[in-house]
Image (tube, rainbow, N blue to C red):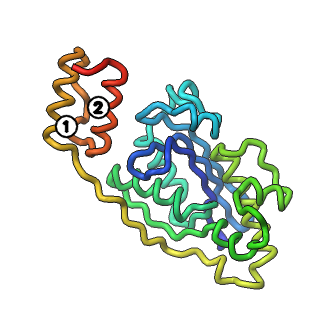
């Protein structure tokens, strides 16, 4: 690959539909040189839990004034152009997350991907762990701020170059980007019962109207109901 984008994202959870992206970091590589970078914190729809903060270091205070994914994702897709995407565990995590958000915004997001985790598992199977941090230790790659999107993306870029240098001549096919067949989990819209209950809760607690209520999924409506009850109580 002469041109590719190495990316990483941080999220509020692991489910493509129920979790929010809170950070995107990426480097655009052209002829083995980083030509441009992308680094954005994103304001989620739900609060960041203390557990996620403990992993990423990203707090609600850090993202409260940042832009929403609706603004950031189109810019990121433009940044990526049409080149292949590289990431560590990108097939099972980053790509499904980005694709889910893109489809929700009615945007097309289809890219070939290359996963450094897949390469590492095959070519470095003797190592006790193929997590990004452990691979960086193995290759003496600097990763000062682990679980921050840009730092992880840049470290993955260096990891990819190390893997390519060590193993491309052994199995060139591992380094060929491939299309990913990914179907989003079925989205079930909120039920009439849920909608009526939300409306009654809002009226009971004088919360006003909920913007975009009709667009919520069944799971999102359930989370909203739980959130209102936890903050204001039942009727």
At a point 71% along the width and 45% down the height, the residue shown is 146
Q: Which residue is at a point 57% across and 40% down the rendered structure image?
A: 40
Which of the labelled discs sits on residue 129, or is there none? none
Circle 2/circle 1 CB separation < 8 Å: yes
* Residue 42 placement (x, y as % from top left): 51, 37
Q: Position of residue 104 (x, y in %)?
A: 34, 51
Residue 114 x/y as whole percent: 60, 69
Residue at 70% in and 58% down: 131
Q: Is residue 45 left or right of residue 196?
A: right
Q: Is residue 33 left or right of residue 46?
A: right
- In this picture, residue 99 sits left or right of residue 57: left
Which residue, as the protein is rendered here, is positioned at the far top? 206
SS at mark 1 in the image: helix
Quarter where residue 164 is shown: bottom right
Q: Give the x, y percent position of residue 55.
A: 64, 40
- Residue 1 sits in quarter: bottom right
160 in relation to 209, above or below: below
* Whether residue 138 is situated above or below residue 39 in the rendered picture: below
User: Image height check: is 155 above or below 110?
Assistant: above
On the rendered structure, is 139 left or right of 226? Answer: right
Residue under the point 84% across and 61% down = 139
Reading the chain from its start, which is encountered first: label 2 or label 1?
Answer: 1
Quadrant holding the C terminus: top left
Q: Residues within 10 Å of mark 2 (few under 14, many from 20)?
A: some
Determine whether the residue tagged by mark 2 lies in a helix, strand or loop: helix
Which residue is disc 1 drawn over? 194
Comparing 94 with 111, the one in front is: 94
Q: What residue is disc 2 on?
A: 225
């Amino acid at each position: 690959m002469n041109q590719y984008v190495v990316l990483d994202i941080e999220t509020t959870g692991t489910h493509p539909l129920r979790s929010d992206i809170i950070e995107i970091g990426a480097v655009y590589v052209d002829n083995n040189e980083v030509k441009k970078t992308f680094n954005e914190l994103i304001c989620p729809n739900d609060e960041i839990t203390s557990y996620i903060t403990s992993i990423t270091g990203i707090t609600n205070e850090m993202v409260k004034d940042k832009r929403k994914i609706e603004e950031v994702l189109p810019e990121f897709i433009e940044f990526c152009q049409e080149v292949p995407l590289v990431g560590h565990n990108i097939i099972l995590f980053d790509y499904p997350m980005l694709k889910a958000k893109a489809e929700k915004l009615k945007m097309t997001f289809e890219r070939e991907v290359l996963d450094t985790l897949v390469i590492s598992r095959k070519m470095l199977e003797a190592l006790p762990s193929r997590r990004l941090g452990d691979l960086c230790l193995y290759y003496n790659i600097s990763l000062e701020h682990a679980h921050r999107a840009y730092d992880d993306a840049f470290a993955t870029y260096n990891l990819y170059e190390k893997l390519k240098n060590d193993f491309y001549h052994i199995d060139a096919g591992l380094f060929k980007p491939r299309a990913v067949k990914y179907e989003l989990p079925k989205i079930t819209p909120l039920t009439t019962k849920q909608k009526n209950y939300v409306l009654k809760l809002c009226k009971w607690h004088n919360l006003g109207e909920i913007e975009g209520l009709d667009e919520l999924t069944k799971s999102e409506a359930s989370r909203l109901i739980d959130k209102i009850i936890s903050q204001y109580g039942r009727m």
